[in-house]
Amino acid sequence: MDYFKAMWTIRTLLQRTTSHKAKLLTNATKVGVSFNPTRVGNDERGYFKEVSGIAKTLKRKTPNCETEPHKFQIRIYFETGYIPPSFRSKGELYRGPDKPKNFTIGSNAWFMCDCPYHKYACEEALTKRAKGNSELRHSDGSGYHSDGPNPAGVPHLCKHILQSLRMGALLKK
């Protein structure tokens, strides 16, 4: 599968999140984010920079509001043709760009968060409807439920990922 043709950009997912659940943007401002060192990797979608960390809701709205820390991962894909130096073949001539273009909201990305909202409302929609912007890791993949948080299966992002993007995930070195 040519994931770059199928994956949605960060911009598209931000627009979908805003139109589907605008309240998530407000809720994201109450989340604290701690980033891990970035790493460069490769998967079936291509070469990427992975930004990961911990996100936690700082203030409780209600006594039952869950405030556990959640692990997130964002893989931002380099443009087609760029190969990071650590993946280049030794002794072979590399004809691609020396440096990658800066990541923007127009970049393709893959998202994962272990929060319950991502599990029940985002993961399956990002995997199946957005064609590869996530994968089923926490969800059982049983489909959307009319009484669930995302009955229409609209691909969008959880507040932890939204806040990590807002806090500069695209700029991390």
Image (cartoon, rainbow, N blue to C red):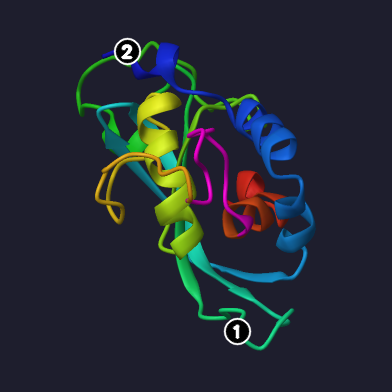
**Residue 17, numbered label:** none
Label 2 amino acid? Asp
The answer to whether the residues at label 1 and label 2 have Cβ atoms under 8 Å apart is no
Give the vertical position of 39 relative to 54 (above or below).
above
**Residue 64, numbered label:** 1
Q: Residues within 10 Å of mark 1 (few under 14, many from 20)?
A: few
165 left or right of 147 in image: right
66 left or right of 133 in image: right
Q: Which residue is mark 2?
A: 2
Q: Is residue 157 magenta?
A: yes
Q: Is residue 105 magenta?
A: no
Q: Element under label 2?
A: loop
At a point 58% along the width and 80% down the height, the residue shown is 67
Label 1 amino acid? Asn
State the image quarter where residue 95 is shown: top left
At a point 61% along the width and 32% down the height, the residue shown is 13
* On-image quarter of the N terminus: top left
Q: Earlier in the sequence, mark 1 or mark 2?
A: 2
Q: Position of residue 74 (x, y in %)?
A: 48, 47
Give the vertical position of 82 relative to 5 (above or below).
below
Give the Cα separation between the discs numbered 1 and 2.
Answer: 43 Å
Q: Position of residue 17 (x, y in %)?
A: 66, 39
Give the vertical position of 134 relative to 115 (above or below).
above
Q: Position of residue 162 (x, y in %)?
A: 65, 51
Q: Which residues are magenta?
A: 148-159
Q: Position of residue 115 (x, y in %)?
A: 46, 64
Q: Residue furthest front?
A: 147
Q: Element under label 1?
A: loop
| The one of 155 and 43 positioned closer to us in this rendering | 155
